Image (cartoon, rainbow, N blue to C red):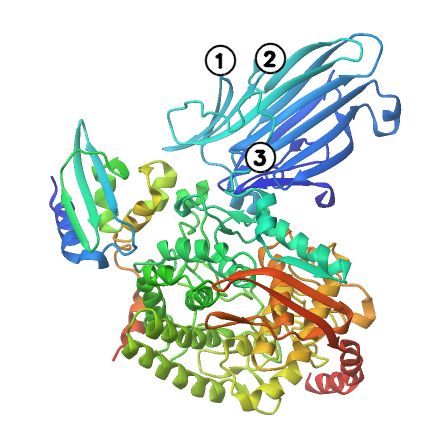
Amino acid sequence: MSEPIEEFFERLTRGGPDRLPGRADGSLRIDLTSGKTTERWFITRHGGDISVSHRNAKADSVIRTSKDQFEGMIAGTVNAMSAALRGVVSLEGDPTLLVQFQRALPGPPATGTVQRAAAKGRRT
Amino acid sequence: MSANIVKILDGNTFVVSDPRGDIEASLTDPTGLFSFDTRFLSTWVLTVNGQRLNALSVDDLQYFEARFFLVPGTGTVYVDAKLSVIRQRAVGDGFHEELTILNHAAEPIELTVRVDADSDFADLFEVKDALKKKGTYSTRIDKDGLHLVYERETFVRMTNIAASAPAAIDEKGLTFVVTLEPHGSWTTDLDVVTAAGSGGRFVRPKYRRGERRALPNMGRSLESWLEEAPRLECDDDRLRATYRRSLVDLAALRFSPLIAGGRSLPAAGLPWFMTMFGRDSILTSLQALPFTPELAATTLQALGDWQGSRIDDFRDEDPGRILHEMRYGEMTAFEERPHSPYYGCADATPLYVVLLDEYERWTGDRALVRRREHEARAALAWIDDYADLLGNGYIWYQRRNEQTGLENQCWKDSWDSISDRSGEIPGFPRATCELQGYAYDAKIRGARLAREVWNDPGYAERLEKQAADLKRRFNRDFWVADEGYFALALDPDGRQVDSLTSNNGHLLWSGIVDKSKAKAVVANLLGPRLFSGWGVRTLAEGEGRYNPIGYHVGTVWPFDNSFIAWGLRRYGFKDEAATIAEGILDAAGFFDGRLPEAFGGYERSLTKYPVQYPTACSPQAWSTGAPLLLLRTMLGLEPVGEHLVVDPALPRSIGRLELLDIPGRWGRIDAFGRGRIDVGKRRTGAKRTATSSTRRAAART
């Protein structure tokens, strides 16, 4: 298990609903393959509560990808939607939950300098 | 070529063929079977005994279904053809074609029937820009039929072709050896199914063999779509035809994004823009609200789910921003284009809040407004935190993706659309005026929702205060005092881009215009420099870049005019709104009720008919919506509390008009009106002052 992935899911539970905006309750399983092993993350959302475990259970949506790709996604270097279109990430089940989940992913590192400056100037 | 192409579609799958039903695409020729922005068939050619066929007639049965009647031989000798060929084609997840051959002779006949098939798997962007492919092609034949495959790394797209009749299949198509009895017939079903992803399994065709009736994927049939919409009764046959055309085209333009659970929203245009666009989907949903409110609900849901959540320069994404355009093709997959989705537009975000409020006012669906509180607040925050690039309280835009992003992020998005009187194009960032109007309206409407639905009066007050401040500054900074209108934009130094444009009408619609200034603005909108007799030009005659057939610099856009008419009603200018409604609806009559995206800005008295601007997409969603919004403005339909207020102001030429069973929070209500406004006088009036205006324009150059 890698540290950045654990930290990411830890932040997800701590952040509560703001980290996963949208209104749909449900469950999402993320299967991450690395060689012959598969690491499973099982996320449920009920009201404002988000919980994360390693249960291998049936979920409303399933994301399958390699651990490498997922590490890229949580670092902001891999865009989830493009990766899904390329077939690097496979998606199954309720797409609403998947779209909500990708909103919790960060943008690419070291970009957005123009906007950040503007936003800073405005917020006093 | 373009005049003779046949287009049928369902969702974002569509087939463009010639009148024989054949497809012979090249990299730049826009025919084929397309799905999710990829061409899955670029060759589909039918021959009988090695001969191509000729079209006798084509029936567009429904927007998703067509029937081609064909005969062998050259066009001139078909009269003694002994054979007829009928291709009936329906779009589904790919398409289904029923091919029938009839022998009219008293003798039996043996035929070799051949269908050539191939695919270049071009991305729509490649079709538009004529780009080369980077992956590899392969073909497979098995018991399920012919499989055309394209692969680039993990990206796999496949076309599967199968026939119900026995066929000899090779890598380039299917051959049938057919013996027809005297007066006999032969039929085969052909299924073409598109697939994405690896594995190569054959996906079940949508239309199982033996199933004769084609149904579209869109949830509701065309019949029930038309039945649910309000009924229009009127003296004017052309208006009735235009209304029906609009409803049918709107049904065809429905697009069901994967996240909408089978519900649909309006895509932007057919065939190249069958996808979700922030601006187009929102504005069309607004136009159609009194007729089909479900489009607005799906638009709010889908755009809300995809709201921006991070900073991403390649996609011009910010937290809270509403997307501009979503695409699913190869170039998007490999990040050669930013449409996954692309966020580079400055108006969809405030307009999202405008639609949310207007939707609630019509439908009373507060549950949806509660569910989307987070998105609405994030959209309102975007206006202040991310769009105000210069920190002076206006929405500014400047793309961060310099390679493939959009330069102009307002609806007038061509490169030369923003210019001053002398034709000078300003630098970036730019603050176009209508964006400030939308921001004002979003804040006012957001305040209403905060007070009435979200129970947050403090937030409502803050928004109202910001809106009042914005209105005060805007009426000072954008006002071109010597001419009595609002400047098109401010440049990065805060200077006015001072040309006279149709954007003034959007300002009336948003309510940002000081009451004291409205009269002068209206005089300009309906004056000879902007008003052509058909409608308001995008850019006024006499301005440096004015060109009556320039895309955003002189043409008349029906959608633009429908919002201008709404704005005129908002400020109480009923006669002027009726004048615009009559001009645009008259123009619709010249296009069999299907308004083009834009037509030439020539003076009406000069050309007598509207000159269509040549564009690739027809129907275009917001042109389709224009007659609907004009009906609303002519009848003066306005939800007030639980009621619908009807305050008709119709041009005399319309005569009697009844719109029956208008859906809303009141259940269903009928609206009646009778034409009493003499628009003709106004048109002549406009012409009379033309001379002085031309002189003024000449003096300036």
In percent of width and height, residue B461 lies at 32, 81
What residue is shown at x 59% (from left), y 40% (from top)? Answer: B9
Query: Disc 1 residue type?
Result: Lys
Say which element carries label 2.
Answer: loop
The quarter of the picture where residue B464 lies is bottom left
Q: Residues within 10 Å of mark 1 (few under 14, many from 20)?
A: few
In this rendering, the answer to whether B375 lies above or below B194 is below
Q: Residues within 10 Å of mark 2 (few under 14, many from 20)?
A: some
**Between B100 and B295, the one nearer to me in the picture:** B295
Query: Disc 3 residue type?
Result: Val
The numbered disc on residue B167 is 2
Q: Which residue is mark 1?
A: B143
Q: Which residue is mark 3?
A: B91
Q: Quadrant of the N terminus of chain B?
A: top right
In this rendering, the answer to whether B541 lies above or below A6 is below
What residue is shown at x 67% (from left), y 67% (from top)? Answer: B556
Say which element carries label 3.
Answer: strand
Query: Disc 2 residue type?
Result: Ala
- Mark earlier in primary sequence (1, 2): 1
The reply to the same-chain question for discs 3 and 2 is yes
Question: Which chain contains the residue that carries disc 3?
Answer: B
- Mark earlier in primary sequence (3, 1): 3
Q: B382 left or right of A7?
A: right
